[in-house]
Image (cartoon, rainbow, N blue to C red):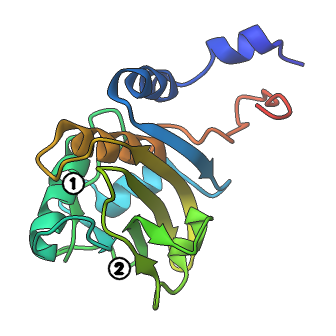
């Protein structure tokens, strides 16, 4: 069995980088989970190269047109160099028909605690505007109605889509949704520590 110190030494670079970013930016990312089926190569094949992966944006915490918010979301997600290379789009021109993947993001969702449920029907999902600059962003990487990864990002002092904190939220959530290796991968023969 691996010692705790050896396990920590093997953490993927993206997890270590995400932890460092969280400490510096005031953004907290939590409730991150990856299904055993998450495969970064499949995600990249579905949205990399000349392909695009659909992003669905629910809610609008700012006083701005939805199309402007969606563009800001895509721009911030696209700036994530640590994650799997994926081209994001609200209306993909060249999606992969054999991989029905999409990313669902919900700003300040009400009445939902499990971000994995964003992959199921979101009809009737209520969202709230930002209060005092506080923002919650739930995200899920979905295959049809099941999640492959999900997480929640929270931050204060989010003045709008032009704020650095807004970009940091999307950057960190995108990085946590699309790590370069599935944290549950046991192909190297290592058994993860319980509760780690």
Name the residue carrying label 1: 49
- Residue 19 left/right relative to 47: right
In the rendered image, the vertical position of residue 153 relative to residue 109, given as above or below? above
Residue 118 against residue 185 in the figure, above or below: below
Which residue is rendered at x = 11% and y = 47% of the image?
162
Side (left or right) of 173 relative to 149:
left
Residue 97 — which label? 2
| Label located before the other in sequence (2 or 1) | 1
- Confirm or deny contact between disc 2 and disc 1 (CB under 8 A): no
Quadrant location, the N terminus? top right
* Residue 97 image-quadrant placement: bottom left
Picture coordinates of residue 24 (x, y %)?
Answer: 36, 21
Distance between the Cα atoms at labels 2 and 1? Answer: 15 Å
For image coordinates 33% across by 44% down, the residue present is 169
List x then y, in percent, for residue 86. Answer: 28, 52
Residue 78, percent across and down?
A: 21, 48
Residue ID at (46%, 91%)? 123
Mark 2 secondary-structure assignment: loop
The answer to whether residue 4 of the structure is visible from this angle is: yes
């Amino acid at each position: 069995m691996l010692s705790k110190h050896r396990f920590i030494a093997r953490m993927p670079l993206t997890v270590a980088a995400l932890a460092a970013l969280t400490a510096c930016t005031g953004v907290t990312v939590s409730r991150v989970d990856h299904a055993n089926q998450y495969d970064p190569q499949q995600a990249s094949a579905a949205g990399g190269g000349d392909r695009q992966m659909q992003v669905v944006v629910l809610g609008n915490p700012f006083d701005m047109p939805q199309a402007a918010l969606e563009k800001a979301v895509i721009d911030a997600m696209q700036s994530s160099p640590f994650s799997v290379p994926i081209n994001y789009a609200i209306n993909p021109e060249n999606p992969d028909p054999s991989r029905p993947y999409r990313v669902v993001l919900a700003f300040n969702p009400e009445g939902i605690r499990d971000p994995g449920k964003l992959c199921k029907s979101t009809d009737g999902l209520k969202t709230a505007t930002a209060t005092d600059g506080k923002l919650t962003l739930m995200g899920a990487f979905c295959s049809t109605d099941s999640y492959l990864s999900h997480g929640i990002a929270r931050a204060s002092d989010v003045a709008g889509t032009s704020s650095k904190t807004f970009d940091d939220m999307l950057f960190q959530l995108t990085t946590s949704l699309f790590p370069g290796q599935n944290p549950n991968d046991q192909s190297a023969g290592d058994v993860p520590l319980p509760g780690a």
